Structures are given as structure tokens and as C-alpha cells.
Amino acid sequence: MSQMRVKAAVMPDFGLFGRWLLAGAAAVALLGAAKAVSAEDDGIIRSHGYSFYGDLTYPADYQHFNYVNPDAPKGGEIALWAPGTFDSMNPYSRKGRAGRYSWMMYESLLGDALASGSAPADVYGEAYGLLAESLEYDEGKTWVIFHMRPEARFSDGSPVTAHDVLFSHNLLLEQGLPSYAQAVKKRIPKAEVIDDHTIKFYFTEGISRRSLIDQVGGVPVWSKKWYEETGARLDEPRMETSPGSGPYMVDEVDVNRRITYKRNPDYWGWDLPFNKGRHNFDKIRIEYFADDAAAFEAFKAGEYTFRAEGNSKKWATGYEFPGIEKGWVVKEALPDGTPPVPTGVVFNLGRDIFKDRRVREAVALAFNFEWVNESLQFGLFKQRHSFVQGADHAASGVPEGLEKDILMSLGDLVPEEIMTTPAVMAHSSNGAREVDRRNLRKAMKLLDEAGWEVGDDGKRRNAAGETMKINFPYPSSVSATLAAFIEVFVQNLQKMGIEATQEKVDPAQYTLRERERDYDLVYDNYRSFLSTGTGLMQMYGSGEAAFSLFNPAGLASPLVDAIIERSLNAESREEEYAALKALDRVLRYERFIIPVWYNDSVWVSYYDQYEYPTPLPTFALGELDFWWFNAEKAAKLKAEGALR
């Protein structure tokens, strides 16, 4: 499966929730951006948007984002698919399996894309007012005040006020994910409503100023009145949805079959420059299928109309059906300007057998990228080495310059090996057969050195006589290609004398097991980082490692923590990038994830009734954001029997 803007089907889809949780782990604004804000004589900065360095691409009087079609027609429907089942429309709880895009009704003070990518999608690290008309903050970023748009309304017609913002902020601290609440409470000690449309947040002194303003600006805003009247909780699954202020609202929910969202004709923000050329479909429909095979057959039959393809075999051989041959379906590989998602086989570092780095390196050697790529994926992928593959701050060679200085300043926390050997690269293998015997011998030597020796029965045991057992669960909804990869990987582990097993699990049960870290190995992902931010601590830091959903390995490294802190306190972009290069180097040294493959383009297929602006922006595909419906093409497809 490829690493795409559209998240792989086997992964939990945190969507907007995941993005604002990790605010600040996004990239910085473009270096060529103009200085859009400045401090007044009173030392207060007032602006229509925010970036850490004060650089904003779009001026206060911008009419629309550069990449959109401001005259895009409104109408039509786009339909996608989702795997498995769902039993909740509340995506903010650890419990239950939330419906796809169930967060898309809610907006924040600083805007973002509702379902895919970011907004604006042509720059990174910049945010512009949505519910907030403007903001002001002191030069030291010790506080921020948001001035809200008085015209903002929830879908039930009630006004969106500062009281709703404060309520939402506190609700997340009281009932949200523990990793989020713990991090935010340390950094945001106080928030207060100044009047119905003005709210102020205060920030803890003596900490990095990163991910403070953009953090509070990205909190989804819910209706205080609805929660108080219904008694609903944020930490419990439920099918009822609170009214949102966004351009879409829930239209129909058929549990485990489909979810339909409809465009709100009375949406308060249609005329905002932030929304021009966006949110163009009248309806967004999500069809649920048991697995990828069933979903693909349904796509060929026209049951849904847009498919992000993650299966290389299907991409190479499956798109030979009447819809393609008759020109009804478009198949495209679109450019992807983002670093690939750091996806791979993740070790549960809470398991004793994985405490030894040599064991992790040995297990990694069971992965034969070359064979998998050629035999299962038609040679369509590249091997990933870095957490920021392709970025300028991907580590290479031995540390030099400012990166070396940063590492040396951390003293004994840094193993000598990091300073004297090149950055860890994914191993190469002989692609002629499933197992590379050279790598197998190296792996077995590492296991011997780690105290896991082979007995007369061919099984590896430690000094206590315990056999080495590794279980690899995966959801039953994954593609046949991914299931075959896991099977071959497990077989290679068995050749090392490891009692390795694979386990196909119902998607709902798999979600629960992931959340409870009930696995030895898991196919999962982290996030790449084009800039620093406190979100890095939630993903890679020690503070919430024991329970964070965004740190599936449970990585807890004082060295990683120290480097992240150094990046957060960087005084220049040069220092920030050097620290991030050191972070990439150390994360690769820890070997807590076996990097697999990536695709430098986005594979999509869709019924020929959609259009998009060209060129596409760098940081989003935007199929649910700024694509639009061509009614004439749709009528032609229906007339020819392609769609009902």
C-alpha cells in the first residue's frame, strides 16, 4: 500500500482531530513569503492570520486562495469508500469506531481543510481566520486574543460565541484524549471570555512559544448549549451529532453501510475569501465495505465515484474493466509534494523482547523490500529511509556543522555511534527470493548476541528458557497485497527460530487492540515533520509515551526529548532545521519502526464528472475541498449507463 495524502485504509483516520492535535508539527511558511504583520507601537501584533515567524503569504485583503477556482460551480455528489464498520459519530473518543469524516461539521478560530489536506494548501505553517476575524498577541507570545465573526452560526441557527470556544477548550481538557489534555494543561493555564465574540488565552512562561497560538486557534468549536441540554460526553461513542458551524452537516447515517453529508445552504461563511472556490459538492457520500476487494468491485459497478488507490497490484493490473475502456473512469497519478508518511512495521517497545535494539534490528532484517516491491507491488514503489524522506533536513552521512554542534551539546545522552557512523539506512536485500540469506545470517548473529540462542528444537530461547514469541495482528479489511507482505514477513521471522504468528482481526476489534497496544508488531504510522512544534512531543516524546495514540511504539527516549526541546527553542530557521535533522538521525537510530515503501505520487481513479484546478497545490490533493462537479459530464455518464 502506498503512503498517500489519503491515509491508508488500514490506519485509524483521525482527520482534522489528528491535525490540530499535532499543530506545529506542520511545516513553516515559505521562505519567500512577505512580512504580513508587524508590532504596533504598543508592542501588540494584530493580524488576519498567524505563522510563528510572522510571515503570511496572503494579505489581509486576499480574495481567495491562489490555487482554487473561485468560479467553481456548486452541486453534485462525490462518493468514496471506507473499510469495515463504524458504531459512532463521535471521533473524539477513544471508545468506539467513528464514522469517516465525522469531524467535518466543526470549524475552528483559525481555519483548516474539513476532510483532506490543509488550508491553505499551497503553503505550510500558515493559518488564516475563519471563526475569528482577527487576532492579536504580544511580541513574547504570552497571550493571544481572538476577535470572532459575529455572523458565525451553528447549523441550528444559534450564534457561535466565545462561550462556545471556551467550553470546547475545557471539554477537551476534561474529556479528551489524555495525551492531549496533559500536554495542553502544562502550556495553557488560563482562558477567559472577554465578551460574546472575544476570547483570550494565556500561555505558561518559561516554555517554547511554539504551538501555542496555532494550538488554541485550531480547537474545533462545539455548541455549549447542545452539550448541556443533551448531557452528551466527548469521551463516549454516540450516533447523535452536535450542530456544527461548517459548510456540511450530516444528512443520513445508515450504520455500517453509509454516511452522507450535505452542503448547508444556510452556511454563514459562503462569502468569506477563506471559502471561495471550496466546498463545492452538494453531497459527500461514504460507502462502507468489508474489505478492499469488495470495495473495488463496487467501484467498477459505479456504487461510488472516487477511489484513492493504495493497492499496487490493482493499480498495475486491475484497471482493465468496461468503465476504463469506455472512457467513463479516469485513472491518474497526480503529483504529491509532501514527504511520505513514515509508515511501517512498528515495534511495541513495552514488550520486554524489544527492549534490546539488536533484537529490533534483527527483526527488521526479515523484511525484503526488493522482493516485496517486485513480486507483490510490480516495482512501483521506492524504499523509505527517513522520517522526512526527500526533505532538506533528512539526515545523511555523519553529523556535520550545526547539527553536530547540537548533538555534542547534549553530552552523554548521545551514543558515540551516532556521532561516528552514517545515519541509519534501510537495509538492502536480494530480491530474487523471499528471504535474503545474507540478511538472515546477520539477523541470527544479532539475536545470538542479544541472548536469544537457538535450541535443539530450532526455537530461540533466552537465559530463562522462554521462547521468543512475536504476534502480528492486522485488520481483515486490508488489501490482499498487504496481507501477503505480512505473511512473508512472518515466515522469514520463523526461519530465524522465532515463534512468529500473524492474526487477522475484525476491524472493530483491531481498533480496540491498537488503542490498548495489544500487539507485538503492528502496521502503523507516525508523522513526518517539516517544522518543529509541541506536537512532536505527543508523537515522539516520553511524556505521554505510555498511552498516546500517536506513539504506537511507546517510544520514550531522553535524547529524543532533548532534541525536540532544542528545536522548540531554536532562534532561527537554520538552527531549527539542524535540530530536526538531528531528530531524524536519532529516530532512525532507535529502530522502533521498520520503514517500508512509499509512492511519490497519488493514485486516484474517478468517474469522469469531476474537475480540479491545475496545477494542484503542493500540500493537498483536495478532492473534497476544491474539486468540483461537472453536470454535463455527469448527465452523459448517466445517459450511457455508467452511473444510475
Image (cartoon, rainbow, N blue to C red):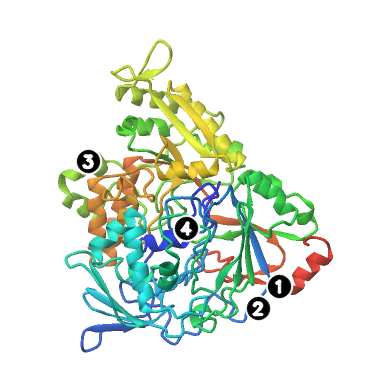
The vertical placement of 1 against 520, above or below, is: below
Packing grade of label 4 (10 A; few <14, some 14-19, many >=20) is many
N-terminal of the pair, mark 4 or mark 2, is 2
Identify the secondary structure beneath mark 1.
loop
Q: Quadrant of residue 201?
A: bottom left
Q: What residue did someone put label 4 on?
A: 91
Q: Amino acid at mark 3?
A: Pro
Q: Could you tell me residue 379's position as x and y percent?
A: 59, 43
Number of the front mark, 3 or 4? 4
- The Cα atoms of the two marked residues, 1 and 3, are separated by 59 Å
Number of the front mark, 1 or 4? 4
Identify the secondary structure beneath mark 4.
loop
Q: What residue did someone put label 1 on?
A: 630
N-terminal of the pair, mark 1 or mark 4, is 4
- The Cα atoms of the two marked residues, 2 and 3, are separated by 58 Å
Q: Amino acid at mark 2?
A: Pro
N-terminal of the pair, mark 3 or mark 4, is 4
Q: Could you tell me residue 78's position as x and y percent?
A: 65, 65
The front one of 482 and 181 is 181
Q: What residue did someone put label 2 on?
A: 73
* Residue 372 visible in the shown view: yes
N-terminal of the pair, mark 1 or mark 3, is 3
Number of the front mark, 4 or 2? 4
Number of the front mark, 1 or 3? 1
Q: What residue did someone put label 3 on?
A: 415
The vertical placement of 58 against 214, above or below, is: below
